[in-house]
Amino acid sequence: MTASEIRALFAVASRPEVVSLAGGMPHLAALPLDSLSAEVADVVATDGLVALQYGSAQGIPELREQICEVMALEGINAHPDDVVVTVGSQMGLDMVTRIFCDPGDVVLAEGPSYVGALGSFSAYQANVVHVAMDADGLVPEALREAIAAVARAGQRVKFLYTIPNFHNPAGVTLAVQRRAEVLQICREHGILVVEDNPYGLLGFDGVTYPALRSTDPDNVVYLGSFSKTFAAGLRVGWVLAPHAVREKLVLAAESATLCPPTFNQLVVSRYLSTHDWKGQIKTYREAYRERRDAAIEALEQHMPLGSTWNKPNGGFYVWLTVPEGIDTKAMLPRAITQRVAYASGTGFYADGLGSRQLRISYCYPTPERIREGVRRLANVIKDELELHETFGPSTPRPVSGPQTPSPDTA
């Protein structure tokens, strides 16, 4: 087990003088806190004996039914019996890895990939093989090549882990025309698909993409969360799995936490039944679109030549490639000194790649703070370039694994 690079940033990034473009924290100021506080108090007053007691390892039935209604927006036809409520979707990811992976098994994942997923895979001693992406998400031909390479090495692929919508950290979305091909490739080779979709309802153009689970329910395990569309601090997520897998997930949940917090589930359930949660998601989308625009405008205004980035159409993140010769992990302490924080790209790869990339999170700061943070970051990068012009570029660090291209578009 190794420390997350993201966790190591929070101690300094939380200082008020530092503009943090590092953590993917939701914009909770957009929530109706006054009405929510009254609802929370009423949960204790009316259902306190249930809310403060132990509950089912699978989660309360009312919330599981409501989760099915939420997933229906993405074309998923699910039964509440196949939903397992978790302490955030991270718990679901951990349980799926524990159930399926033995030491030495291979997990395929996009390159780059979510740092929390890489941590879970590493903890269970699974080997991650990255699959290349481009501006349209995971590349099907690269998936075929990765599967063939693993087979030639005499190893076994247990599942493909993918974030199809508004990817963390890359910000790209898997093109609709590619989704069926990716699912077909995995079916041909007997590979389970684990679909992690916390951002799917946060598209800036109002489009909700069909979930992979919606077209292949027998071979896709779906991970969902209320952390991005309601409140991260409640830590309520879920797994939708084929029935036989569901049984194993419940057993894994019992051994991990005994049961998810009933109080938190009731708060989420009450919110879904009494508030305009679809309207709240629209409010979130508008807030994040404004912040995305501020980040892109600042990048266009301040970044030096040789920098490239994508323009996400939803979610929380911009994936930035810096000019040749700059190591974003080595540069991070100097950026903190200049009072700006980001997540260096190496934390999102299992094979040492990503030294020229970094993730910008625009979800939490105000647009004004985002512009200022990008300006500070650009100045740090320009200072690095001046050092390289004076003393020459640093020697590139050796990396293992394939030279997977990053999903950067100018």
Image (cartoon, rainbow, N blue to C red):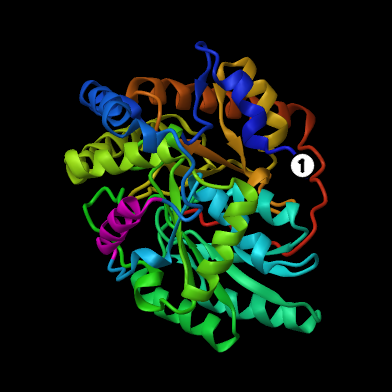
Q: Residue at x 70, y 41 (%)?
A: 325
- Quarter of the image where the N terminus is located: top right
The extreme top residue here reads 17
Q: Residue at x 23, y 23 (%)?
A: 38
Relative to the observer, which residue lies in front, 275 or 118? Answer: 275
Q: Main secondary structure of the magenta part?
A: helix
Q: Callout 1: helix, strand or loop?
A: loop
Q: Residue at x 52, y 84 (%)?
A: 187
Toward which corner of the image does residue 64 lie, by quadrant?
A: bottom left
Relative to the observer, which residue lies in front, 373 or 92? Answer: 92
- Residue kind at label 1, given as amino acid type: Thr
State yes or no: residue 234 in magenta.
no
The residue to which callout 1 is attached is 2
Task: Answer with left or right where residue 308 lies relative to residue 45.
Answer: right
The x, y position of residue 184, in whole percent, is 47, 84
Task: Answer with left or right where residue 79 lies relative to residue 390.
Answer: left
State yes or no: residue 72 in magenta.
yes
Toward which corner of the image does residue 252 lie, by quadrant?
A: bottom right
Give, as a single range, the part of the protein colored magenta: 60-74
The x, y position of residue 401, in whole percent, is 76, 62
The x, y position of residue 194, in whole percent, is 52, 66
Q: Is residue 14 visible?
A: yes
The x, y position of residue 335, in whole percent, is 62, 23
